Image (cartoon, coloured by chain):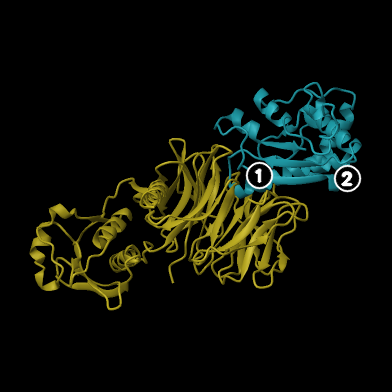
Amino acid sequence: MQRLSLVVAGTFLCLLMLAAIGQAHAKLTIEVTGGAEGAQPIAIVPFGDVDGARPGVDVANVISADLTRSGRFRAMARREMLATPSRQEDVDFREWQLLGMNNLLIGEIRPAEGGGYDLSWRLFDVFSGDQLAARSLRSTERGLRHAAHRIADQVYETLTGERGVFATRLAYVTSRDRSVDSRVILRVSDSDGYNPQTIVDSAEPILSPAWSPDGKRLAYVSFENRQPSIYIQELATGRRQRVASYEGINGSPAFSPDGRRLAMTLSKDGSPDIYLMDLASGNLTQLTDHYAIDTEPAWSPDGRHLVFTSDRGGRPQIYRVAASGGPAERVTYEGEYNAAASYSPDGQYLVMVTRVGGRFRIALTDAQGGSRRLLSNGALDESPSFAPNGSMVIYASENNGRGVLSVTPIAGGAGQRLSQEVGEVREPAWSPFPR
Amino acid sequence: MSIRWQLSLSVLVLALTGCATPPPPPTAAPSADELDAMGSRPAPGIEATRERSPLDDPASPLYRKVVYFEYDAARIQPQYAGLLRAHADYIYNTPGAEVTLEGHSDERGTREYNLALGDRRSDAVKRFLMAEGVPEERIRTLSYGEERPADPGRTERAWSENRRVELVY
C-alpha cells in the first residue's frame, strides 16, 4: 500500500515537473531591442517586508523589469545601491544624487487582515526630495505580480504623463513549428510574458484572437470543426460559444467598442463580405456586398465606422464604411498592398500591413490614410495591434526564420522582441486596460 | 478585374483552345511524394468496388488533384482546364461521388486576407465544375488560407506550390 502510494506520488511529481517544464517553455521571453538613449535613471529599492510578511514575489524586481522594458527608464542594479531604505525617514537623498539617480521608489509589504498583503509605496524626486506620488493597495499572494505591474503603471504615468500598460495582457497563437502536424495553441499571458494561460489547444489552425472591450472574453477563429468558425470564450471560466459557423469562411472577428456587436467576415452568400452580429440576439446585418474580397473589419473607437480590406479596386486596399451601412470609401492610395488596418485608441491613426518592394511591413497613417510612416522593416511582418495607451504597436515578425512578436513605440526608441524558447509565436492582440 | 469576369474569360479561352487538346503540364507540378500522398486518400463511394479507382491510378488524368494559382489571384489558369474537366466528368458520372475543394494561399500578406483568397480560389474551381454540369450539392468548399502550406519553405518555389486548390474526394 505504502509502495503504491509512493508510485502514485512519484508519478504525480513527474507530471508536475513535466507541467512545470511545459510552462517554462511556454513563457514568452522579452528582450529590449535598439538603443535606450535618454532612458531616465531610477532606483527601485527592494520593498521592506514588515510584520513577518514573506511574499513569494520580488515586487521591486517586477517593477524594475517593467520600467526598463519600456525603454524610457534605466533601473539601477541592486548591488550598486549603498542603502535599501523602505521608509521615508531612512532616505538620504544626497546619496541617491551622487549615484546619478533622478527618481527613487521605496515601499513596504505587510500581511493584510484576512490573508494577502498590503503594499504601500512612495516615489520621490531625488534632487528636490519632493514626494511625487504615494499609494497603497491590497493584493492576494497570487495577485502579487499584477499588483507590481499596477505600481509600475502608476510610476510610469507619474513620470511620463502617459498611462502605463504593464498590467495589461497579450493574446497570441503558438505552435512548435510551421509544419501541418504541429499543435496550435491560443494563449494569454501578462504583458511581460509571465503567467501563460492556454485558452485553446488544437490540432487545427487557430487565428485572429480579438479582445472584448471589458477584457473578459476573446473571440477567435478555429478550424477544429473542419471549417473556420468563430468562437467567443470567457477567460475566467473557459466557457465558450460557437457564434458563426456558416458555409464558407467565418473570420476576422472584431468586438464593437460597446461590446454588443461582433463584426466578422462571412462568405456564406458567395464572396467574403463584412457582417455585424448582434451578440444578444445572434441577428446578422450585412454591411458590405461586393463580389470582391471584403475582410478584416476594425471599429473606430467611437463605434461609428469600420475600416476593412477590399480588393474591389484590383489590389487589397483599406476602405471605410459607416457602422449603420451605406457606401464604402477608399482610405489608402499609397502602395499596392494595404491590409489588416486598425485604429489607434484615440482614433487619430491607422496601423496596417503594407507591401514595400516585395516586403510586408507595418505602416502607420493618419485616419484618412495619409502621411504614411513605416514602423517595421521585416519581410513578413503582420497582425499589428495597438497597445491600449496608443504608444506602441505589437506585431508578428520573423527573427532568424522563427516567428516572434515585436513591439515598437510609435514615437521611436527602444523596442521589444517577445519569443518562446521553443516554437513559433504569431497573431498578437493587446488587451484593453484592466478594469 | 472581377473574379466572375476572369472566370468567364478563362472559360472562353478554354473553349477556344478546344477540349481534345491534352492539358499541358502544370507550371509548378507537385512533387512525387505529394502526389503519392494525395493519391492514397480513399474515395468514399468507390471503396466498395474491388477495382482500382481512377483517382488512384497514376495513368489516369484524375490522379492529379491540385490546381495552382498566380500570386494574389483566384483566376483558373488555362492549363488546368483539362484536369478540372476530367474531374467534373468523373463526379458527374459517378453516383455518390462528392468533392471538397480546399483553397490555400502562400504565406505572404495578412492571414485573414489569405483566408478570403483561399475561399475565392475554391469558389472559382467550384464554379468551373458547376459550369461543367456538376450539381452544387456534390461540392463542398473549404479555405485554409495560409495555415496549411504544402511546403513550409520560404522560397518562390514553395510559395507557388502553396497557392492551390486541392480536390479531396
Of label 2 and label 1, which has the lower sequence position? 2
Q: Which of A185 and A267 is in front in this view?
A: A185
Q: Which mark is residue B135?
A: 2
Chain in yellow, by letter, is A
Other-residue count near label 2 (Cα within 10 Å), few / some / many at <14 / 14–19 / ≥20: some
Q: How crowded is mark 1: few (under 14 residues within 10 Å), some or many (20 or more)?
A: many
- Amino acid residing under circle 2: Pro
Reading the image, the residue beneath label 1 is B144
In the drawing, does residue B119 fall left or right of residue A363? Answer: right
**Quadrant in the rendering for residue B88:** top right
**Pointer 2 indicates a residue of which chain?**
B
- Residue A253 placement: quadrant: bottom right
Q: In this view, does A33 lie above or below A63?
A: above
- Residue at 68%, 27% in the rendered image: B30
Q: Which chain carries label 1?
A: B
- Residue B60: percent from the left, percent from the top? 82, 24
Q: In which quarter of the image is the C terminus of chain A?
A: bottom left
Question: What separation in Å lies between label 2 and label 1 (alpha carbons)?
Answer: 23 Å
According to the colouring, which chain is cyan? B
Front residue of this view, candidates A37 and B125: B125
